[in-house]
Amino acid sequence: MKSTWFARATAAAAVLAVSAVAAEAVTLRTFNGGEPASIDPHRVSGDWENRIVGDYLEGLMTEDANAVPVLGQAESFDISEDGLVYTFTIRDDAVWSDGTPVTAADFEYAFKRLLDPALAADYAYLQYPILNAEAINAGEMDVNELGVVATGEKTLEITLENPTPYFLDALTHYTAYPVPMHLVEEFGEEWIDMENIASNGPYTPVEWIPNSYIRAVKSETYYAADSVSIDEVYYYSMDDISAALQRYRADEFDILTDFPADQLSLLEDQYPGEARVAPFLGLYYYVLNQNLPALEDQSVREALSMAINREIIGPDILGTGEIAAYGWVPPGTANYDFGEYRPDWADTEYGERVGMAVQMMEEAGYSDDNPLELQLRYNTNENHRRIAVAIAAMWEPLHVEVELFNSEVAVHYDALQENDFDGVGRAGWLMDYNDAINMLELLRSDIIYNYGRWANEDFDALLRQSATMTDLEARAEVLREAETIAMSEVAALPIYYYVSKNVVDTNICGFLDNAKDIHRTRWLTIVEDGESCPDMMDGM
């Protein structure tokens, strides 16, 4: 292994080399959304952070241009006959950007770090299929009992609690990424500072200007560097999507990861083919703080849900075709062929439904003289504001007075995680892997992402039961029963199933719409005006 001095010198030389050719660099400028809270894979939680982290770190498995799991840092794997033991062989040419080899020990160290309760990683539960992971994360077992063992320098063995059909997909998630053990042990939490960081993915972060951008440059130590065509990436942080669209129109951005829904017609007219709207696995929803006495009342929660006219939000309020959601698990979720959950009142004519909701609220004691006062929080975004204004108006006949409150994305989600909101909070979830459990776990009583703190022991027990089941059809029945409990008790308010909304310059090739809305820069290339796109699938 190279000395620390040699590793630093190698990294410095790489940065100088990049600077020398900066004038000729192929640059991608991406509007990325909110300011990242971190780029440590064990400290992040948002898609705006995932876009950065997934470009500079790579797991045993990674995603291709269609977001399908493919081999990443692993060159091969074997699965035992009982489905419990996965043995991965790591590439000989897997190397950190400072020249240090990527080893199985880096992965073992990262999984143990993720699940160590002292780190308090919010997303640790996504790796609970691993043997003893949940007990370790709860502080009930020593971290060295985790079912992840480096059996050789390049061989990693992962043992699961139960056969898990989606496990390879789960390994594409950033909770399964390695961290450079040598740097974390030397620098602690400061290993992600720009002067310390090392990557094992296609890019290496080299500059972070808070509330402006993170810049990453192509890593020449990446095993597939020869197939990576973009030299540097700017991930711009902005909450104002209208301003981002103006910058795109001024040729300051190449990709927008969101746009004001009411500007779709303008984009289609003036930039044909550049607005990309596609369905993908995710849910836009409101959480109800059930630690507030008013919202402990299930009839109040149900009345609020009934009064939301979901059918007009996608086509009319947003104009981008989002599908009305009454259930928690998105249509198209793998091994879950029940159709969308729908409450009994979902097909009732909307005006009649509102009348039923008004009666329920009045029976709960609310009137014009005694309205229910709620704060509706959302993270700063024009589309979120428009939806909040519309839903507040829908609730007005129910004797509900709504105060709208917005904040930047990091502040907003910190408040939700701390259950620090006075009524209703906007949230959204993009599925980390294609399995219903990834949605339903959001409502577990012991998960920090259960922002409203709804709790039901039967629901929790069904999720635990599903984790022991190998019959996929029987498992799906159990998960459907859990979804039915949650939705019948109005654990939260599903609003619509997402469509991805991107704007992509016509000179960018390799950006393929997919169900996860994940588009790693590795698969993108930029061509000159009039040039055709190369076949970027050859290297996959």
Image (cartoon, rainbow, N blue to C red):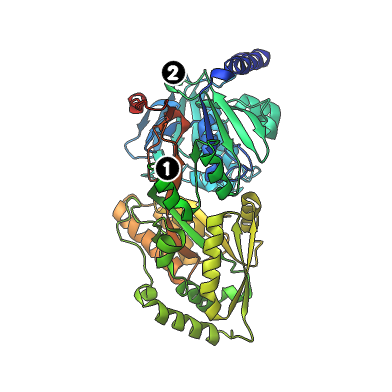
At x 58%, y 19%, the residue is 22
Residue 450 position (above or below residue 270): below
Residue type at mark 1?
Tyr
Q: Where is residue 65 drawn, in percent x and y?
A: 38, 34
Which mark identifies residue 176? none
Q: Where is residue 527 drawn, in percent x and y?
A: 42, 26
The residue lying furthest to the front in this view is: 270
Residue type at mark 2?
Asp
Secondary structure beneath disc 2?
A: helix
Q: Tell me the residue that label 1 is attached to.
A: 271
Q: In which quadrant of the rendered view does residue 502 lie?
A: top left
Where does the C terminus fall, quadrant-wise?
Answer: top left
Q: Nearer the viewer, residue 530 or 83?
A: 530
Res 159 seen here: yes
At x 49%, y 77%, the residue is 303
Q: Where is residue 209 drawn, in percent x and y?
A: 67, 34
Q: Tell me the residue that label 2 is attached to.
A: 226
